[in-house]
Amino acid sequence: MVEFRVDRGSGLPAYLQIAQQVREALRLGWLAPGDRLPAVREVVATSGVNPNTVLKAYRELEFAGLVEARQGAGTFVKAGLGTGDREALGQLYEELAGWLSRARQAGLEDEDVYALLRTALDPDRERE
Amino acid sequence: MTDGLALAAHGLGKRYRATWALRDCSFELPEGRVAALVGTNGAGKTTLLTMIAGLLQPTEGEVRLPRGGRVAFVAQDKPLYRNFTPLDMLRVGAKLNRQWDQGRAIDWLTRFDVPPGRPCGKLSGGQQAQVAFAVAVGSRPSLLVLDEPLSDLDPLARRAVINELLTEVADTGMTMVMSTHVVAELSGVADHLLLLADGALLMSGDVDDLLAEHRVYIGPRSPEPPVPGRIVQASHAGGQSTFVLQGDAPVDEPWTVRPATLEEVVLARLSAGWTVAA
C-alpha cells in the first residue's frame, strides 16, 4: 500500500504531489496494474489532505490513462510505467545508495547531487 | 440560489457606528469545498463568519444558503457551560438540533481523550475546543464555519483536528469555511482561498489555480524581473533580487524559477493590497 506525503512548504500543488508519487510508485514497481489505489477517505485520514485534492490527483492520473475508477469499487492501476528490468532496478538502487553515501562523505549536498545527475543525463549541456 | 453552491455572499457589508468592518463582499462557494479565510487582524474575518452563521445581521447585502442547509458555527472563544460536562453539552446539542448524530460526537470526544464526565470549566483549553468541535460535527452540518479553530491547540493536535475535520468532509460531503493565521499549514488542506484586508475581499478563488499562476524568480540584483509578467512583489537584498510574478515564463541562468508557495502568494498579495476580480 502506498502512503502519500504532502510537503506543505512546496509550491507544487498537493494534487500534483500525489499524482507524482503514484507515477513514481508505478516506475519503481511498488504499484502494478490491477492494484487498488488507497481510498480517498484513507488518504485523508493518514495524510491530512483535502478529499477534493485526492480526487483531483486520481482524476489527473485517469486522464493520463494510468488508472481507472470502477464504480463503487475504487480506483485501480491500469498501466505500468517502468520500462526497465525489475531485477536490474533493485541492483541499480543498491549501487546508487552506495554512491550516495560516498557523495555525502565527500560533503556533497542535495543540490550538488542533482547538479551532477543533470549533467550526467545531458553531458552536452555543460560543454557549451 | 444556483445548484451546487454551499454558500453565496452578495454585496455583504457590516457597519459598526461610523466604521465599516466589511464592505461589498461577494463570493460563491461550491458544495464540498474547504475554504480558508485569511487576513490580517481586524480585516473583518470574524464579522464575515458571524454573518455567514446567521448570528449577525448584515447592514447591507445578504448571505444565501441552499434550501435545507444547516450551518454549524464554532466561535473563536468556543463558549461552553462551565458546570456542564462534555456529555451534558452533547445532550444540549441533541435537543437544539433537528439532526443529531450522537455516534459522531462521542467518537470525536473519544478520539481526543476528552473525559466525558468532567465539568467543562475544569478541562484544558484544548479539551474545551474538542467539546465544541464534537457538538459541531454531531449536528451534521452541511456547512461548518470555524473561527480560528486551531488557535487553542498545540501543533500535534492541530494536525489531528485538521485530519478529523477533513475526514468528516470526505464522509459527509459537508462544506467547510475556516479562518486562520497559519497560512503555512493550509497547503493540501484548503482548496479555496478567501483573502480579506481592511474590510474588503481581495480575492476568492481556487488554491491550485492561484498556485499555478504564480512563480518566484531569484537572480542577480535588478530593477526589473527577467521575464514579462505582473509583479506581485519585488524584494532586493544585497546582490540578489526576488520577484513574485503572475506568469510562468522559463528563464535563463543565472536566474532560477520555482513555484510560489501559498504562503508567499498570500503575503505578497496582502502587502501589495491590489484587488482582483474573483
Image (spheres, rainbow, N blue to C red):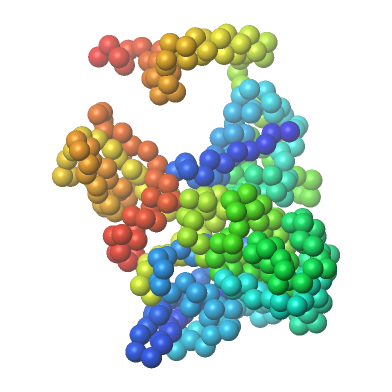
Q: Quick one: B19 or B125, which is closer to the camera?
A: B125
Question: Which residue occupies 76% across, 61% down?
Answer: B114
Q: How far from the left and from the top, in percent, is residue A2?
A: 69, 34
Q: Quadrant of the N terminus of chain B?
A: bottom right
Q: How far from the left and from the top, in percent, is residue B239?
A: 19, 35
In the drawing, does residue B133 fall left or right of residue A19? right
Quadrant of the image occupied by residue B23: bottom left
Quadrant of the image occupied by residue B31: bottom right
Question: Which residue occupies 61% across, 58% down?
Answer: B153
Residue B245 shows up from this direction:
yes
Which residue lies most toward the left here? B223
In the drawing, does residue B108 fall left or right of residue B61? right
Question: Which residue occupies 59% across, 72% down?
Answer: B77
Q: How far from the left and from the top, in percent, is residue B268?
A: 33, 55
Figure label count: 0
Q: Quick one: B76 or A122, which is closer to the camera?
A: B76
Question: Which residue occupies 39% across, 19% down?
Answer: A112
Q: Quick one: B224 or B235, which is closer to the camera?
A: B235
Which residue lies most toward the front here? B122
Q: Quick one: A123 or B23, which is closer to the camera?
A: B23
